[in-house]
Image: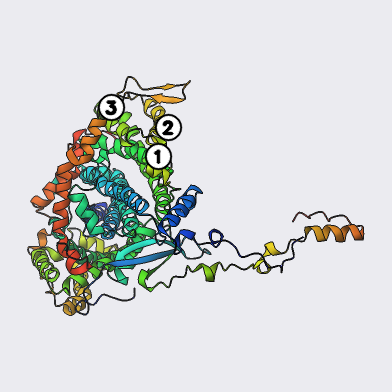
Amino acid sequence: MTDPLALEPILGPTERGRPAFNDDLSHDERFALFEAHIADGLKIEATDWMPDEYRTAVLRFVEMHANSELMGVLPEREWLMRAPTLRRKLALTAKVQDEVGHAQLLYRVAEDLGKTREAMFDDLLAGKTKFHNVFHYPTVGWADVGMIAWLVDAAAIVAQQALRDSSYAPYARTMRKICWEESVHIMHGRDVVVTMVTGTAGQRAAIQDALDRWWGPLMQMHGPRSARDTDRDLHWKIKAKTSEELRQEFLTIYVPRIRELGLVIPDLELRYDETAGTWLYADPDWAELRTVVTNHGPMSEQRLAFRRLAREETRWVRESILGVPATA
Amino acid sequence: MTAKHVPGTAAPELVAWEVFRREKDGDPMRHGGSVMAPDAELAVHYARELYGRRQESVRLWVVRRADIVDLDDPDLLQPPLDRLYKKPGGYVMRDKLAAARAQAGQAKPKARSK
Amino acid sequence: MTATASAPTTALAGLLLAVADDEFVIGFSDSEWTGIAPLLEEDVAMSSLAQDELGHAAALYGLLAELTGTDADAIAYDREPGAYRHCRLLDHGRGDWAMTIARRYLYDTADGVRLEAMVGGSWAPLADLAGKLAREERYHRMHAGAWLDRLARDGGEGRERVLAALAELAPDAATVFTPLPDEPALLEAGVLTASSAEMERRWRAGISPTFERLGLPMPPPARDPGRGRLDHGEAFRWLWSEFTMVRRSDPGATW
């Protein structure tokens, strides 16, 4: 029986609610405690001590994500003006607004890790940091708008859902908010695609053409296969799934949904292997991915230039009214 | 709307404001996230946009991050000595009750459904 | 849907088209800031304002569609540029941030007065809708007012630019109050509770304390006021060619 008034022994540091690596210990001790903390599935906040490797890895991960949301606005932005009905215009404006909002949320997470927004924009526009491959390609028509909103967002959501339990708590919380907001986008995209597929011959052809052009980049989007045991982002639990796991998940959900519309996926090798329990597919063009994400994609330079110009045009607002410090 | 920016007094500075929101009637104010703004008037606009444009909040607060008083000292919040006497978990009576019932020849009363 | 007994359908249609076209055009112009506004937070804010205007346009086109037995999207999209009846204030291109704010301020304050004149009106569907729109427009005036203040009181570039914007918009600023052809019928039937001239007076009385405080020149009377909703220029033609592009690519298709 427990005597409630008994004084228990003094609790050890890890049980006192604040992670022990925040205490004044040697770097090696702190590092070991930090690794154990992560391995136990526990979380890190912005004010915690972090090894440089972790801080750098999280910042790079979040920054690329933020950059992608921001650059992702540009392919769809052109078509905002051209949306063919009131309802589509409202839906697309709201969707693109959400992307800007997500950029805000993600840049805030990165800012709290110690890098200013202006420094991040400087690096993005100078080509020093990256954004996802899909946003380096042109959008040639309304069909592309539907395809992107459906499948590119779907591929992104598969990755984002897996990030909701990231070890870096501010990022995990942001991902939960983002996932909640994203679900509507896929529905909008799918609605546009299904409407066009059941529309005129021209509309159907445009959708198939869009799929033909976007399939390659989509398959490259989650990145080349990486070994679980050498992936540092997995080690630190910044992310929880490998590129291949995400790609398989995307294929499992979306291949049937694409085929049920009578669309043909431009990969003759794509099939589900029942025995292996995985999708087999033609090897994505990893050289293309490398070329594109280093800003040599078809629209990379144009879009970066557009952003640079827009930033210059509004510099006076930030410097005189908003109070963002003038950069060199 | 509270404090308006008065240019000419001090150069505007973009700083972080924490946003708290109430989702629905009866809920407490919960931290939602943060926005960058030069003053309270714009901070509230931006909070409404980032945390309320979908009609997902019924009330919002914004507070300059620098004005928040932060406590995370474990000695104060998670002091080491036992405090079970302050918590329900410190009052486990199962064995004592079993002994008392056995002594009184009583069975454990059935829980009444409400 | 019945019009009120004494206001002909054409009169109501003319009013609805003018107001709807105003909201549609400003909504489109402002959505041009998406992704490139001065601050991410402001980008999201401007986008909400644009969506509100488009939502208002959709509601007004919807009312007009019910009244005339047509389709809201057809009304919004399937006219030649010359057939749009938005006011000339909204024909100016997006411009810089100061231009956008100056135009929004002038438009939102004018729209507020116009909505007030419809809220107490005799045609219930419009009076009801105007009541809802008025509540949403308050937020727009808060944003425009906050920014006009900051620009006008800025020591340097902000003030220069907002003055330049007001100067460019000056001949068209009051065109929101262009008298509609069937205005006498609307007034007589009580659909509008004030004439355009009276609305303009109220608008000027409403904004003059702010303009005085900020040392800004009051907008002059509209140039060529009878044509305030006609003669849309190049900037609108460009906008029209953009927003009708997809629709014209496959006429009759469902999107």
Give whichever of discs 3 and 1 has the lower sequence position.
Answer: 1
Q: Distance between the residues labelled 2 and 1?
A: 10 Å
Q: Is mark 1 on a helix, strand or loop?
A: helix
Height in image: A271 above or below C47?
above
Q: Is residue C84 visible?
A: no
Residue C142: x, y in percent? 28, 68
Label pair 2/1, CB-CB below 8 angstroms: yes
> In this rendering, which labeled residue sits more in front, label 2 or label 1?
1
Q: Say if labels 2 and 1 share a chain.
A: yes
Which residue type carries mark 3?
Answer: Gln
Numbered label attached to residue A158 = 1
Identified by mark 2, the residue type is Ile
In terms of sequence position, does the residue under pointer 2 or pointer 3 come before the other? 3
Which is more foreground, mark 2 or mark 3?
2
Q: Mark 2 points at which residue?
A: A253
Identify the secondary structure beneath mark 3.
helix
Q: Which mark is residue A208?
A: 3
Mark 2 on the same chain as mark 3: yes
Which of the marked residues, 2 or 1, is nearer the chain's N terminus?
1
Q: What SS does tag 2 mark?
A: helix
Q: Which of A19 and C192 is in front in this view?
A: A19
Chain assignment, label 1: A
Chain letter for the residue marked with disc 3 in the picture? A
Whole-percent x and y of residue C205? 20, 76
Residue A41 on image: x %, y %: 50, 49
Alpha carbon separation for disc pair 3 and 1: 23 Å
Q: How many labels does the image show?
A: 3
Q: Do the residues labelled 2 and 3 touch (CB within 8 Å)?
A: no
